[in-house]
Amino acid sequence: MDRHGNTEAGAARRRALGQPDSDPGLNAPGYRAYVDEYFHNDIGGRDILPMADRLIPALTALCFRGAEKATERMVGAALDNGLEVRAILEIFIQSALYSGIARTEEAIETAGRVFAARGIALPEDAPDTRTPEQMDADGAAVMEKLHGARQAGGYASPDNPVTFSLYQGAIRHGYGQLWVRPGLDLRQRMIVAIAGFTCAGLHDSLRKFAVSALNTGLSKDQVAEAAIQTAPWNGLPIALTGLTVISDALAAAE
């Protein structure tokens, strides 16, 4: 396909994400062709992840950026491409671990407007009746499944009283509460984590989770793709830096 064909293919993908040719943001000379060819075709057109999974890093990155209009469009595109309402909300809820609750609440509010406009009711959440001890045990089980013997290294080490005083809560409320919630399976939650750590530049966490991602059914190429698909929404240099970390971590684990 020649460059004109690539640009047209990218334009079609952009429109499918809810951004029409008439959008005022595309009016700078040459800009529309540039983003259509590069961001929407060369990056957005990669099929290493299925389309629904490809939108998970995009939603995660947009939650980081707080880009209201783009988030609104992406939520609509996610609904149109097979992501359920609960899955979209869980992406934003999990992103609170990486970007903080303020960004997550803005993203949830934006998504709510899209759901309301489409007449979609929010799913009900069953009460969590587990004790804190049960949550700790569930969290430990998830950590073991994901990380194995690597689960207690670095900031996660119980021998480090400074970091573990905070990380202990992450075991209970991250792994033991969030990672077992309905809406996303472990594979999809790992895509959120890889995208979130990439966007935040959290290289120690990214190094750890890149290897653990293989335990959820993701291939090495798909782990890298979770970082690549953040690039249009959170910036190319940040994605490239994350990819370097992922590549080195996976190579060292062989």
Image (tube, grey):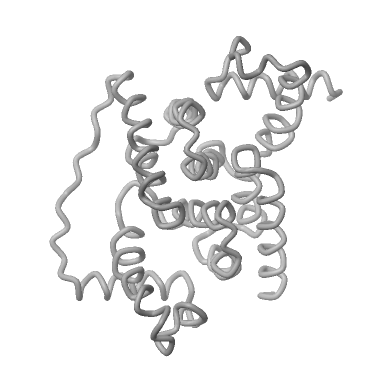
Residue that sits furthest to the right in the current view: 2
Task: In this rendered view, identify the residue nearer to me: 204 or 249.
Answer: 204
User: Picture coordinates of residue 161 (x, y %)?
Assistant: 39, 86
Q: Is residue 30 above or below residue 199?
A: above
Image-quadrant location for residue 204: bottom right
Left or right of residue 178, residue 68 in this image: right
Residue depicted at 40% across the width and 53% down the height? 100
Point out the residue furthest to the top here: 22
Q: Quadrant of residue 36?
A: top right
Q: If the image is split into quadrants, where does the C terminus sit?
A: bottom right
Picture layout, residue 127 above or below residue 167 = above
In percent of width and height, residue 72 lies at 44, 27
Looking at the rendered structure, the number of numbered marks drawn on it comes to 0
Work out which quarter of the rendered image holds the N terminus and state it.
Answer: top right
Q: Is residue 196 above or below residue 154?
A: above
Task: Where is residue 29? Give x, y as percent.
Answer: 77, 16
The image quarter in which residue 178 lies: bottom left
Identify whether 37 is placed above or below 167. Answer: above
Residue at left offset 13%, top offset 61%? 129
Farthest bottom residue in view: 159
Q: Position of residue 43 (x, y in %)?
A: 70, 37
Residue drawn 50% across the image and 82% down it: 153
